[in-house]
Image (spheres, grey):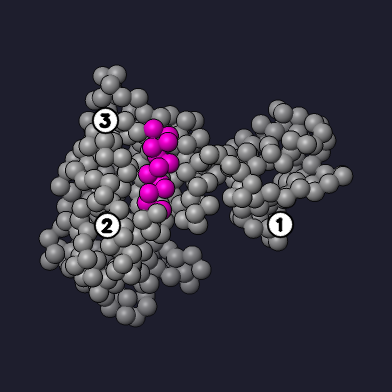
Amino acid sequence: MKMVTVPFFISHQGCPHTCVFCDQRAISGSSGDLPTQYDIIAKIDAWRQNAGKRPLHVAFFGGTFTALPVPVQNKLLEPLQPLLESGEIRSIRISTRPDGIDSTVVRRLGILGVTTIEIGVQSMDDGVLEGSGRGHTAADSEAAIRCIRSGGLSAGAQLMPGLPGDTAAGSLDSLEQVVAAGASFVRIYPVVVLRGTELARRFLAGEYQPPGVEEAVQLCKVLLHRSLQAGIEVVRIGLQADEGLNGDTVVAGCWHPALGQLTRSELYFDLLCKLLADFTHGQPSVVRCHPSRVSDVAGHGKMNLKRLKNNMHQTMIRSDRNLLPEEIVVDNFTCSIKGNIVTDLKYR
């Protein structure tokens, strides 16, 4: 049963640096003020009302949790202890920087019920990290992931393709390195240029050009495919569509509220094209897929179906619970062909 995440945004809290891309308050729509113990309990109670029988998971997003003074960290985690003991919440997630992790930190957080630590890796290229003002190295990220896993906790890695100096090959290499280090899951956030940031100044001055949506989708498609091959979950692609992100705050870059679906749809479209290559144009066919993937196979705004129609392929989609989410089957009057987006596609 899928857990319900109760989010607390502590934007910029504890951060020792201001990176060239960063405006967490705009991203989250939150001022980042630390919640009081009353706020924490009240919000969990409110979310519990709508969760039904689904378990609750508490997550502290943004900021650098482990750079907060230890008494402040304890103040945020202490009201959760009786809820963990009673089973009212199942787990706790925090976010931090790679250089904010060591074995002592991991041990202390584990005792307080933290099960998952996400770190802002962004890139595993030291040149990209330095040019972005990150203040840490790729070696710090690798060490942090290994330390978290050694401490028995789940390690997540946030990656940001498209930073100054980054390349498509470099982004894929960054993914490969965090997978090799032992990351349990990744988030992929292609660069969004926010007004008021150093990155916005560079863009407006003509010093930097971020990837747009179309370019980023093609890159994220490859990153998602590699993650699936490695058995690593991609928990999100693209920034959350919150109130803080709008035409006034986004200057350039890869901003689309359905970026994850656009990316997944490209994988299914590539597989459809491969399976349909030997079919006669104009011949009607039925595409079967798992019920949870119907919208992804059809494409955002049914774009995949429209593109196939333009290529003279008449297709309709049917759900089939006997198929895995990664599989699709194309049927026509004479044959039936099955494919899998993980095993039947190659991008490198």
- Res 240 seen here: no
Q: Nearer the observer, disc 2 or disc 3?
A: 2
Magenta stretch: includes residue 187:
no
Residue type at numbered disc 3: Leu
The vertical placement of 61 against 51, above or below, is: above
Question: Residue most toward the top?
Answer: 206
| Callout 1: SS | loop
Give the camera-side residue of 262 and 172: 172
Label the magenta part by its dominant secondary structure.
Answer: helix
| Residue at image coords 26%, 19% | 205
| Residue at image coords 24%, 51% | 140
Q: Are marks 2 and 1 in contact (CB under 8 Å)?
A: no
Residues shaded magenta = 167-179
Q: Residues within 10 Å of mark 2 (few under 14, many from 20)?
A: many
Residue type at numbered disc 2: Ala
Q: Earlier in the sequence, mark 2 or mark 1?
A: 2
Q: Are marks 1 and 3 in contact (CB under 8 Å)?
A: no
- Res 179 seen here: yes
Disc ID at residue 248: none
Question: Mark 3 sits on what residue?
Answer: 199
Disc ID at residue 320: 1
Q: Are marks 2 and 3 in contact (CB under 8 Å)?
A: no
Q: Position of residue 219 (x, y in %)?
A: 47, 36
Q: Earlier in the sequence, mark 1 or mark 3?
A: 3
Q: Earlier in the sequence, mark 2 or mark 3?
A: 2
| Residue at image coords 43%, 29% | 212
Q: Nearer the observer, disc 2 or disc 1?
A: 2
Real-space CA distance between mark 2 and mark 3, rounded to the nearest whole angstrom:
27 Å
Question: Mark 2 sits on what residue?
Answer: 144
Q: Position of residue 187 (x, y in %)?
A: 40, 49
